[in-house]
Image: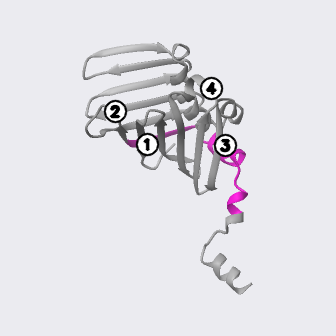
Amino acid sequence: MRWLRIALAAGYVLPAAAADFALSDLMRMLAQVPAAQAHFTETKHMAVLESPLVLKGMLTYRRPDRLEKHVFSPYDERTVVAGDTVTIENRTRNRTTTLSLAAAPAVLTLVESLRATLAGDVPLLERLYASRLEGRADHWILTLTPRDASVAVLIDYVRLTGMDARVVRVEVQEVGGDRSVIQMSASSS
């Protein structure tokens, strides 16, 4: 028993304590965040590129369904997802495109993985993905595997890493081997 008191006093968490942290707990924490903003660095590893493409910018989320990704470098581009619409404004090329997410089911499913997670929407998340949660409330990893066959032929998994109610890393592994990793600074509401 003495070793247990020492371990607890030192701040060690026993493996059994991690088992007490469930998907519903994570979703409840995330559902309490009305908005978040973070600087990001995205590294895209693509077979067609000799070296990874590195993007830097700002990510913004506002409840219930608004995501914004503003790339500052190496070009200036703003992508806004609001409801079922995606607007891409490339300021470098002076071009704006608006699309319906319904026309791109794979993109819709990827967007919904983020929106459902950030909103704490368990039913939507479970409808679109098989999920596996590891860790504790202060450091967790949520791996999402697409349920829809048309998406599963494109995306192997989406892995979100977080600390408390903050997502700090998003990794998208494509079936063909391409991979994107977004690393975020501490979010603020």
Label 1 CA crowd tier, 10 Å (few <14, some 14–19, many 20+): many
Q: Are marks 4 and 2 in contact (CB under 8 Å)?
A: no
Q: Are marks 1 and 3 in contact (CB under 8 Å)?
A: no
**Drawn side of residue 149 relative to residue 82, left or right:** right
| Three-letter amino acid code of the residue under disc 3 | Met
Magenta residues, start to end: 17-41
| Residue in view at x 58 percent, y 38 percent | 118
Q: Are marks 1 and 2 in contact (CB under 8 Å)?
A: no
Q: Is residue 8 above or below residue 39?
A: below
- Residue 91 sits in quarter: top left
Q: Earlier in the sequence, mark 1 or mark 4?
A: 1
Label 3 CA crowd tier, 10 Å (few <14, some 14–19, many 20+): some
| Residue in view at x 35 percent, y 39 percent | 45
- Residue 59 sits in quarter: top left
Q: Position of residue 109 (x, y in %)?
A: 57, 26
**Drawn side of residue 117 relative to residue 127, left or right:** left
Foreground mark, 4 or 2?
4
Distance between the Cα atoms at labels 1 and 4? 30 Å
**Drawn side of residue 135 relative to residue 38, left or right:** right
Q: Which mark is residue 148?
A: 4
* Label 1 SS: strand
Distance between the Cα atoms at labels 1 and 3? 20 Å
The residue wearing badge 3 is 27
The residue wearing badge 2 is 71
Distance between the Cα atoms at labels 4 and 2? 30 Å
Label 2 CA crowd tier, 10 Å (few <14, some 14–19, many 20+): many
| Three-letter amino acid code of the residue under disc 4 | Asp
Q: Earlier in the sequence, mark 2 or mark 3?
A: 3
Distance between the Cα atoms at labels 1 and 2? 12 Å
* Label 2 SS: strand
Q: Position of residue 186 (x, y in %)?
A: 45, 50
Q: Position of residue 106 (x, y in %)?
A: 53, 23
